[in-house]
Image (tube, rainbow, N blue to C red):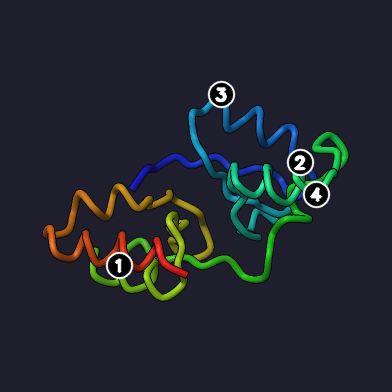
């Protein structure tokens, strides 16, 4: 898990999010509302496909507009097996880690791959790479 994860505010622009991703060297940011609760995840792919590719202006599009439904999360106590099952069933590569209602970090596909035996790593990659 990567601790100390920074959010992008739901009311902040996608351009601000892209700049923050660049500064932090990350490909995704959690979207947090004014209530400081997780609203979703914003990825670099979301920016390209849903904003730039759709002809929207990233300086006028808020990050919150790209949050889709309830974010898929895991608990701070969850083990690698539970993380694997959650990633596989929801086909997500990054999972926000929640302790109660507080965002405490993010687990990425690479984090799980380092923690699992080789056959399970292959299963994870296969599950996330197929439609």
Mark 1 or mark 2, which has the lower sequence index? 2
User: What's the CA distance linking mark 4 and mark 2?
Assistant: 5 Å
Q: Position of residue 10 (x, y in %)?
A: 74, 50
Q: Are marks 1 and 2 in contact (CB under 8 Å)?
A: no
Q: Which residue is mark 4?
A: 54
From the image, state whether disc 3 or disc 2 is nearer to you.
Answer: 2
Residue 46: horizontal and vertical position, in percent?
A: 65, 49
Q: Residue furthest top?
A: 23
Residue depth check, mark 1 versus mark 2: number of the one nearer the observer: 2
Q: Is residue 114 left or right of residue 94?
A: left
Mark 3 nearby-residue class (10 Å; few <14, some 14–19, many ≥20): few
Q: Secondary structure at mark 4?
A: loop
Q: Residue at x 56, y 24 (%)?
A: 23
Vertical comparison of 121 with 81: above or below: above
Q: Which residue is mark 1?
A: 84
Task: Answer whether labels 4 and 1 touch (C-beta < 8 Å).
Answer: no
Instruction: Please tell me whether residue 127 is drawn above or below residue 110 in the rendered image.
Output: below
Residue to which mark 2 is pinned: 52
Q: Few, some or many C-alpha atoms within 10 Å of disc 1 (few <14, some 14-19, many ≥20)?
A: many
Secondary element under disc 1, as helix, strand or loop, is helix
Question: Marks 4/1: CA distance?
Answer: 32 Å
Residue 100 horizontal side relative to residue 108, left or right: right
User: How far is disc 3 from disc 1 in space, using C-alphas?
Assistant: 29 Å
Proximity of marks 4 and 2: CB atoms separated by less than 8 Å: yes
Q: Nearer the viewer, mark 3 or mark 4?
A: 4
The residue positioned 32% from the left and 73% from the top of the image is 85
Dot 3 falls on a residue whose secondary structure is helix
Q: Position of residue 112 (x, y in %)?
A: 27, 55
Task: Determine which quarter of the picture holds residue 68.
Answer: bottom right
* 27 left or right, relative to 114: right
The residue under label 3 is 23
Report, in whole angstroms, how far the alpha carbon at label 3 lies from the one at label 4.
25 Å
């Amino acid at each position: 898990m990567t601790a100390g994860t920074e959010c992008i505010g739901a009311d902040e622009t996608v351009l601000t999010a892209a700049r923050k991703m660049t500064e932090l060297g990350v490909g995704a940011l959690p979207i947090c509302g004014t209530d400081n609760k997780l609203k979703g995840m914003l990825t670099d792919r979301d920016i390209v496909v849903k904003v730039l590719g759709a002809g929207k202006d990233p300086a006028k599009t808020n990050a919150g507009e790209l949050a889709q439904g309830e974010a898929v999360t895991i608990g701070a106590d969850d083990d690698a097996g539970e993380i694997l099952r959650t990633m596989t069933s929801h086909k997500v590569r990054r999972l926000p880690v929640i302790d109660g209602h507080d965002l405490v970090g993010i687990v990425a596909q690479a984090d799980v791959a380092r923690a699992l035996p080789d056959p399970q790593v292959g299963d994870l990659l296969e599950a996330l790479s197929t439609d």
